[in-house]
Image (tube, rainbow, N blue to C red):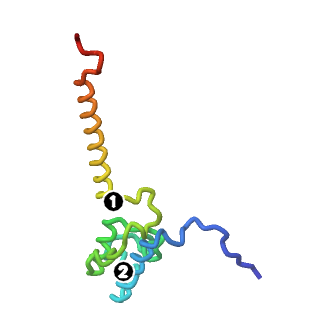
Amino acid sequence: MLAVTPRESSTVPRFHSAAARTIGERIRDARRAEGISMDDLSELSEVSLTSIGKIERGAQSPSAETLIRIATALAIDPGLLVSGITSQDYGQRTRPYSVRDFMREQRARERAESERADDEDEDEGTIAPGDAAS
């Protein structure tokens, strides 16, 4: 009898991210609610069957185009698939700042540079003691 051993390592990740898993579950639920197969969804959305499978398992995060194609085929609003998902659901960010944070820092830097330039202009126009002509 042939013994079957589980794979020790796999090149296919179990899931891409919590966000991808949530989106995949929502797509699977919508597809099943419509009573169609993954093959049917692939045909209707013009997205490969392999990609549909990976997306539903959460192993692949769909592009915006793919998301819209799938939602259109399922006759649902694409926003329903991503509702409530934040960047935190994609894992640790190296720069956890928003555009507001960025702009606030940018303005603070610009103000500091402007104040420095004003101080330098004032210093150049001041006559130091002992330099005044007698």
In this picture, residue 16 sits left or right of residue 31: right
Q: Residue furthest front?
A: 134
State the residue at coordinates (29%, 20%): 129
- Residue 74, position as x, y percentages in the image: 30, 80
Which of the 4 image quarters holds residue 64?
bottom left
Q: Residue furthest right?
A: 1
Mark sitting earlier along the chain (2/1): 2
* Residue where numbered disc 1 is placed: 98
Tag of residue 68: none
Which of the 4 image quarters holds residue 4?
bottom right
Where disc 1 sits, the SS reads loop
Mark 2 or 1: in front is 1
Q: For the residue carrying disc 2, how many other residues have a C-alpha within 10 Å: few (<14), some (14-19), or many (20+)? A: some
Quarter of the figure that contains the N terminus:
bottom right
* Residue where numbered disc 2 is placed: 40
- Residue 109, position as x, y percentages in the image: 31, 44
State the residue at coordinates (30%, 57%): 99
Where disc 2 sits, the SS reads helix
- Measure the alpha-carbon separation of dots 2 and 1: 40 Å
- Residue 82, position as x, y percentages in the image: 33, 74
In this picture, residue 118 sits left or right of residue 32: left
Q: Nearer the viewer, residue 32 or 98?
A: 98
